[in-house]
Image: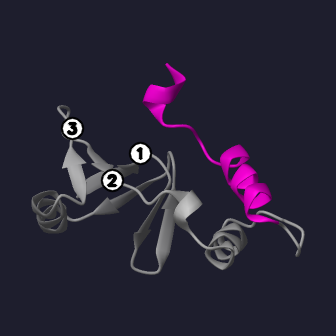
Amino acid sequence: MKTVTVEKGCVWVGKDRYLTGSSFDINDKEAERLIRKGVVTETEDGGIIAKSEDPEKLTVAQLKDLLDKLEIEYPANAKKADILELLEKNTAPHPEDSV
C-alpha cells in the first residue's frame, strides 16, 4: 500500500473527494499506474503527492456538495467566494506552505 497526500486543492478518487492535507491509501499497482500517467508523483522519501484540482475551477454546486460531504455548514444562498473561504478555513495547508 502507498499513502497519497493531497498537495493542494481537491482530488477525486472514485466518488470520494480529498482536500489539501488529507491522505488516502492505494495499492502499489494502482500507485505505479498513476505515477506513469502523471496523475501523482513519488517523493524522494517514497511518499506520493497527488496533483489536485483547483477548487476555484469547481462549480458552486460541486463546492456545496463538497461542503456537505465534509459536514461544513453554509448558508443556502452562499456565493462561490464564501464557499471557497469556508473550504480554506476548514482544510489543512500543504506542509511546505507552513514552513
Q: Position of residue 50 (x, y in %)?
A: 33, 53
The image quarter containing residue 79 is: bottom right
Mark 2, residues whose alpha carbon is within 10 Å: few (<14), some, or many (≥20)?
many
Disc 1 vs disc 2: Cβ atoms closer than 8 Å? yes
How far apart in space, not on screen, are marks 1 and 3 (Cα)? 12 Å
What segment carries the magenta color?
A: 79-99
Find disc 2 in the rendering and name its residue: 50
How many residues crowd mark 3 within 10 Å: few (<14), some (14–19), many (20+)? Answer: few
For label 3, the residue is: 43
From the image, tell me which residue sits under label 1: 7
Say whether residue 68 is left or right of residue 28: right
Whole-angstrom CA distance, mark 1 to mark 2, is 6 Å
> Which quarter shows the N terminus?
bottom left
Q: Nearer the viewer, residue 9 or 30?
A: 9
Question: Of residues 53 and 2, which is closer to you in this image?
Answer: 53
**N-term mark: 2 or 3:** 3
**First reached walking from the N terminus: tag 1 or tag 3:** 1
Mark 1 packing: few (<14 Cα in 10 Å), some, or many (20+)? Answer: many
Q: Which residue shows up at 50% across the image and 45% down it?
A: 21
Q: Main secondary structure of the magenta part?
A: helix
What is the three-letter code of the residue carrying label 1?
Glu
Q: Is residue 69 magenta?
A: no
Give residue 42's position: percent from left, percent from top.
19, 44
Question: Does residue 93 show up magenta in the picture?
Answer: yes
SS class of the residue under badge 3?
loop
Which of the labelled discs sits on residue 51, or is there none?
A: none
Q: Residue at x 44, y 60 (%)?
A: 53
Q: Quadrant of residue 2?
A: bottom left
82 on left or right of 49: right
